[in-house]
Amino acid sequence: MKTKAVVAPLLGWIVPGLGHFVQKKYLRGIIFFVSISAMTAMGLAMGGKIYPFYIEKPETIFQVFTNLLKKENPLTLLAFFADLGNLLVYLASRVLHFGQGALERMTFEFGTAYIAGASLLNYLVALDAHDIAVGKKK
Amino acid sequence: MIFESHLLSMVVYAFFTALVLAFIRRRESKARLRYGLFVFLIMVGGALLFGWFMYLFTL
């Protein structure tokens, strides 16, 4: 497998559009970067939440699995995997403590949907960068 | 506070999603425009229809 086929989607995963940019698909790279970053920024401005990976500390091996269901809402695990799609923003939110979510704001739900939607789109963008690298797409 | 209107939030969300999907799925400009418009209209129209459908449960 070509190195580009691994590097391009990885770069695209870290920064939206970067996987296209390094393959000289400048227009697409810029459009992906602007769109996904704008959605994420608007989501954060609306008080949306970036969900961390969090489960209660297990005391037995069995609890590793049961704790996945015990959290106040097990669906937050799915939100975590969605938010992970925009890796740089996810890591920055953990280090700089933003994206904590402002539940009291009426735009909280929409903001969270914006952030998760942008991150899920970034998975598709990274896969597109891979397809271009292996020659499946132009 | 931005986007207190849920409708506006939904329209902007649909716009960006349609834009990204059009550039992923289609390669020619015309095809992109058509596909992007299609996705945008399906998202906005579908949400409005579903919204009115849910309104029936409040009657």
Image (cartoon, rainbow, N blue to C red):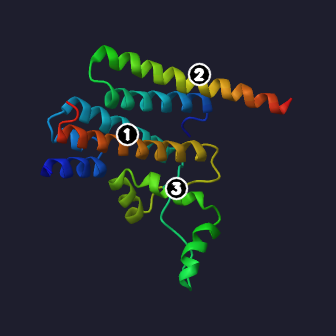
| Labels 2 and 1 in the same subunit | no
Using the image as rendered, state which of residue B34 and residue A99 is in the foreground. Answer: B34
Give residue A58's position: percent from left, percent from top: 55, 81
Give residue B24's position: percent from left, percent from top: 32, 31
Q: In this image, B12 relative to A107: left or right?
A: left
Q: Which mark is residue A36?
A: 1
Q: Which numbered disc, 3 or 1, marks the residue closer to the eye?
A: 3
| Labels 3 and 2 in the same subunit | no
The residue where tag 2 is placed is: B45
Quadrant in the picture for the C terminus of chain B: top right
Q: Amino acid at mark 2?
A: Gly
Residue B58 figure quarter: top right
Q: Earlier in the sequence, mark 3 or mark 1?
A: 1
Residue at the location (46% across, 19% down)? B38
Residue A23 figure quarter: top left
Q: Amino acid at mark 3?
A: Leu
Task: State which chain disc 3 sits on.
Answer: A
The residue where tag 3 is placed is: A78
